[in-house]
Amino acid sequence: MGTKKIVITGGPGSGKTALIEYLTQVGHYCMPEISRSITIKAQQDGIDQLFLADPFHFSNLLIQGRREQFNHQPNAACAYQFYDRGLPDVVAYMDYLKLECPDHFLSALEEHQYDAVFILPPWAEIYVQDNERYEAFDTAIELHAHLYNRYSALGYQVHSIPKATITERALFLLNTLNNLL
């Protein structure tokens, strides 16, 4: 049967990382978002927003990091391995910027298939901008649409997680998974 690979995606500030952190706290195996660490490293190197300054380089670093995450095996047997964003997120962001994706990005999407995809909707009441999340809320709405469309175009059934407390969101996610897989 094996561990099922589950993506949690959504536009910036939709509560993905909080949900991933909660799932980790209650004992689930989760892979963190890596774009923040790439952004922070670039800022330390004097590049304020690597995604805007060099989107291809930034995206290539994300593809590389997310491939490594995908191929990482949990030490213990677990039913689910959760990802704070997946490989298709990289291409969705490039879609948003109207940039053509290199072939090796598209190949990576074909080579790394997830078992289920969940998306969190834009949520103005919890949205906060900071040094790594610089997008305006309107941009978060647009990115949400690009993420949904990209995953759908790849044949994934995208399950929307409702706006609710973190505990309620986690229960919705786990109940849906138990019914699906």
Image (cartoon, rainbow, N blue to C red):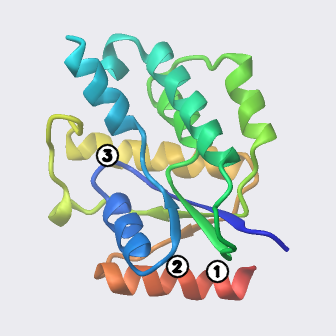
Residue 46 lies in quadrant = top left
Circles 1 and 3: CB distance less than 8 Å? no
Amino acid at circle 2: Leu
Is disc 2 surrounded by few (<14), some (14 to 19) or many (20+) residues within 10 Å?
many
- Residue 92 location, x and y as percent? 54, 37
Q: Amino acid at mark 1?
A: Leu
Q: Nearer the viewer, mark 1 or mark 3?
A: 1
Label placed on residue 140: 3
Considering only order in the chain, which callout, 2 or 3, is on the residue closer to the N terminus?
3
Q: Secondary structure at mark 2?
A: helix
The reply to whether callout 2 and callout 1 are in contact (CB within 8 Å) is: yes
Q: Point out which mark residue 154 bears.
A: none
In the rendered view, does 145 fall on the left or right side of 22? right
Q: Secondary structure at mark 3?
A: helix
Q: Quadrant of residue 75?
A: bottom right
Residue extending farthest to the right is: 1
User: Do the numbered discs 3 and 2 sit on residues whose CB atoms are within 8 Å?
Assistant: no
Gap in angstroms between the C-alphas marked 2 and 1: 6 Å
Q: Which residue is mark 1?
A: 177
- List x then y, in percent, for residue 36: 32, 38
Q: In the rendered image, which quarter contains the N terminus?
A: bottom right
Quadrant of the image for the C terminus? bottom right
- Of circles 3 and 2, which is in front? 2
Q: Amino acid at mark 3?
A: Ala
Distance of label 3 from label 2 (alpha carbons): 22 Å
Question: Toward the viewer: 69 or 151?
Answer: 69
Percent of width and height locating residue 42: 29, 19
Name the residue beneath numbered marker 2. 173
